[in-house]
Image: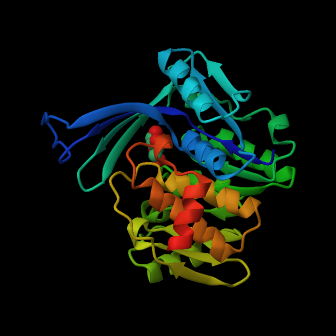
């Protein structure tokens, strides 16, 4: 096993609404769901659905009913629970609104995800890690330790700097990253300005490389993405046109797919297409982990597009 995902598990409590409520307003929602989410879990599910061997998922849930539900859901996705700890805290939750334009608002309560000490996971979990994927819904110092431990063992480290944080908090992490995958707002948090077009995103990706990275990918959602590599190449690709209904976890699915693609040694061009297709297909279904497509669905979609 060689892809490791270290990160969060949330139970996503999602309401589907016509429009977002305004401050002080109570509205009727069309529907709701309570499902597995969390950027770490979504990325682990993506890796599991897209690769024959899956990945090793290192995470924490609480010893509560939501923790039991999260474990059950992870098992349903065939994810090994050996490194999913149960701690005495509430399981992380995300409160999500999705509107009829497929936009969302999300607030999270970290709970068990925040229970990691500065030293992060047991170093042994990284013993055979070739690709490590991390995000920022667990304590940043623990994420940094995980990155440093995996790097020490020769792993390629992908940092998904989500949710957006302050540059001074992210900088110490970038030091141990090989690749970074911000969206436009995360990019702004790091470099101080927000790319709006693919040309601007390419410029931003080049600026990100100055932090010592090998690869920077700036995601612009339905506007596509831009990238820059330390070998001097850079460019952009448009997004796939799909009928999006819920973009929650599309970015997570992208990152999981990127980890699989780089692990499989796809060319960068193929890896970006593969990851973009996975993100786009995720946006066509409601929910987070549940919306992530299977490898066969992504491969078929790529043949048609
Ligand atoms: O990226 C989407 C995820 O963000 C949701 O599943 C939610 O849990 C929050 O962590």
Residue 210, visible in the rendered structure: no
The residue lying toward the viewer, choosing from 188 and 3, is 3
Q: How many marks?
A: 0
The residue lying toward the viewer, choosing from 48 and 29, is 48
Asked if residue 15 lies left or right of residue 265, the reply is: left
Colouring = rainbow
Q: Tell me the residue at 65%/49% (across/down).
A: 47
Asked if residue 72 lies left or right of residue 164, the reply is: right
The residue lying toward the viewer, choosing from 54 and 116, is 54
Asked if residue 215 lies left or right of residue 69, the reply is: right
Residue 32, above or below 140: above
Q: Position of residue 151 (x, y in %)?
A: 81, 53
Residue 135, visible in the rendered structure: yes
Residue 189, above or below 9: below
Q: Position of residue 211 (x, y in %)?
A: 66, 68
Q: Tell me the residue at 15%/43% (across/down).
A: 22
Q: Tell me where residue 195 sits by quadrant.
A: bottom left
Q: Position of residue 35 (x, y in %)?
A: 44, 32
Q: Position of residue 241 (x, y in %)?
A: 39, 70
């Amino acid at each position: 096993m060689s892809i490791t995902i270290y990160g969060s598990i949330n139970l996503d409590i999602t309401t589907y609404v016509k429009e977002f409520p305004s401050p002080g307003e109570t509205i009727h929602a069309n529907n709701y769901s309570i499902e597995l989410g969390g950027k770490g879990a979504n990325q682990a599910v993506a890796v599991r659905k897209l690769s024959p061997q899956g990945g090793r998922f290192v995470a924490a849930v609480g010893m509560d009913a939501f923790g039991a539900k999260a474990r059950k859901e992870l098992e349903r996705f065939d994810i090994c629970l050996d490194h999913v700890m149960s701690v005495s805290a509430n399981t992380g939750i995300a409160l999500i609104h999705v509107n009829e334009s497929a936009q969302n608002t999300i607030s999270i309560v970290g709970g068990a995800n925040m229970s990691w000490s500065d030293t992060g996971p047991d170093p042994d979990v990284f013993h055979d890690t070739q690709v490590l994927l991390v995000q920022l819904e667990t304590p940043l110092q623990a994420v940094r330790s995980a990155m440093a431990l995996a790097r020490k063992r020769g792993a390629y480290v992908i940092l998904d700097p989500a949710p957006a944080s302050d540059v001074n908090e992210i900088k110490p992490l970038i030091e141990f990253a090989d690749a970074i995958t911000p969206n436009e707002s995360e990019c702004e948090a790091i470099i101080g300005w927000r790319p709006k077009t693919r040309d601007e995103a390419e410029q931003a990706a080049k600026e990100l490389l100055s932090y010592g990275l090998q690869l920077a990918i700036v995601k612009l959602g339905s506007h596509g993405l831009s990238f820059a590599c330390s070998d001097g190449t850079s460019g952009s690709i448009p997004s796939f046109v799909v009928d999006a209904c819920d973009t929650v976890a599309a970015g997570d699915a992208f990152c999981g797919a990127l980890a699989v693609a780089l692990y499989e040694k796809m060319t960068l061009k193929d890896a970006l297409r593969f990851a973009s297709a996975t993100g786009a297909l995720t946006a066509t279904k409601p929910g987070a982990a549940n919306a992530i497509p299977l490898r066969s669905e992504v491969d078929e979609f790529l043949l048609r597009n």
